Image (cartoon, helix red, strand yellow):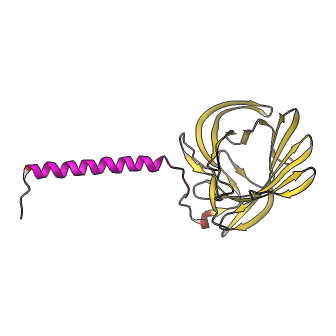
């Protein structure tokens, strides 16, 4: 058996220590990256359910209102009874209908699924219709997971933590929205009521590096604030 002299030991320990530092710095760099994959088994994804900040149950409605350049804006978000098979998963259709002064601006059909194990909600795509001078125009940002290199993103984690960064959608060249959790303790007063312990996220996209938006979600309710519009009504329609 060969003996290792003291100076050799020093060199070995130094190399090991440097290796630990290198691995630590690498891990730190990786942890600061935007999460793109989520380790979910598709067989665990279902079309109905809810977590603290996102309700994916048929009949649920969020109605937000505001003003933009003197015009009344409204966003109605409805969880429909419809489902759609996308990328091997049965997803729930959620319709978003945006109007200005009562005239349609955009209607989108969004596709979501929730994990029955983790409670994370995932975004599988959208089909958008825009209105130009009263005429329908197919939206340029329509996409579906599994088509053209697109992959589903996470729209709402079940257990968000400050600093968490993840892609909400991953359709290169079309839709690359991502979210960073900024706060879990926001207080918010909107026409629908006063809410505490709210989640605040900052949304960005590498497709428009200078764009930045903020959204606020209330526990047990969902979206409170979006692009200057505030929640005025929520709950299951007809109840």
Q: Is the magenta stretch mostly helix, strand or loop?
A: helix
Residue at 69 percent across and 48 percent down: it is: 54
Which stretch appears magenta? 7-36
Residue at 81 percent across and 53 percent down: it is: 59
Against 43, residue 162 (above or below) is: above
| Magenta-colored stretch includes residue 33 | yes
Query: Is 47 placed left or right of 154 in the picture?
Result: right
Against 107, residue 67 (above or below) is: above
The answer to which image quadrant residue 226 occupies is top right
Query: Observer-nearest residue: 142 or 180?
Result: 142
Query: Observer-nearest residue: 62 or 134?
Result: 134
Residue at 67 percent across and 62 percent down: it is: 46
Query: Observer-nearest residue: 232 or 131?
Result: 131
Query: Is 9 placed left or right of 182 in the picture?
Result: left
Q: Is residue 59 visible?
A: yes
The answer to which image quadrant residue 161 occupies is top right
Q: Can residue 115 be seen in this view?
A: no
Query: Is 143 placed left or right of 185 in the picture?
Result: right
Query: Observer-nearest residue: 153 or 105?
Result: 105
Residue 109 spot, x, y in % from top left: 79, 57
Residue 14 spot, x, y in % from top left: 20, 48
* Quadrant (top left, top right, bottom left, bottom right) of the N terminus: bottom left
Which residue occupies the extreme bottom position in the image? 88
| Magenta-colored stretch includes residue 34 | yes
Residue at 65 percent across and 67 percent down: it is: 146
């Amino acid at each position: 058996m060969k003996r290792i002299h003291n100076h050799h030991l020093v060199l070995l320990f130094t190399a090991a220590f440097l290796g630990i530092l290198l691995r630590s710095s690498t891990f730190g760099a990786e942890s600061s990256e935007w999460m793109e994959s989520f380790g979910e088994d598709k067989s665990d994804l279902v079309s109905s359910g809810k977590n603290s900040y996102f309700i994916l149950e048929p009949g649920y409605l969020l109605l937000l209102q505001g003003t933009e350049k003197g015009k009344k804006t409204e966003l109605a978000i409805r969880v429909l009874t419809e489902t759609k098979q996308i990328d091997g998963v049965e997803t729930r259709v959620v319709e978003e209908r945006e109007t200005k002064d009562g005239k349609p601006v955009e209607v989108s059909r969004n596709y979501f699924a929730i994990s029955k194990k983790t409670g994370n909600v995932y975004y599988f795509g959208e089909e958008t219709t825009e209105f130009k001078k009263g005429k329908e125009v197919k939206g340029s940002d329509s996409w579906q997971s599994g088509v053209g290199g697109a992959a589903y993103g996470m729209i709402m984690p079940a257990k968000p933590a400050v600093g968490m960064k993840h892609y909400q959608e991953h359709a290169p060249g079309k839709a690359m929205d991502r979210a960073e959790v900024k706060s879990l303790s926001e207080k918010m007063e909107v026409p629908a009521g006063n809410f505490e312990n709210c989640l605040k996220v900052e949304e960005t996209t590498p497709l428009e590096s200078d764009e930045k938006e903020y959204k606020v979600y209330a526990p047990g309710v969902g979206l409170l604030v979006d692009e200057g519009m505030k929640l005025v009504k929520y709950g299951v329609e007809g109840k």
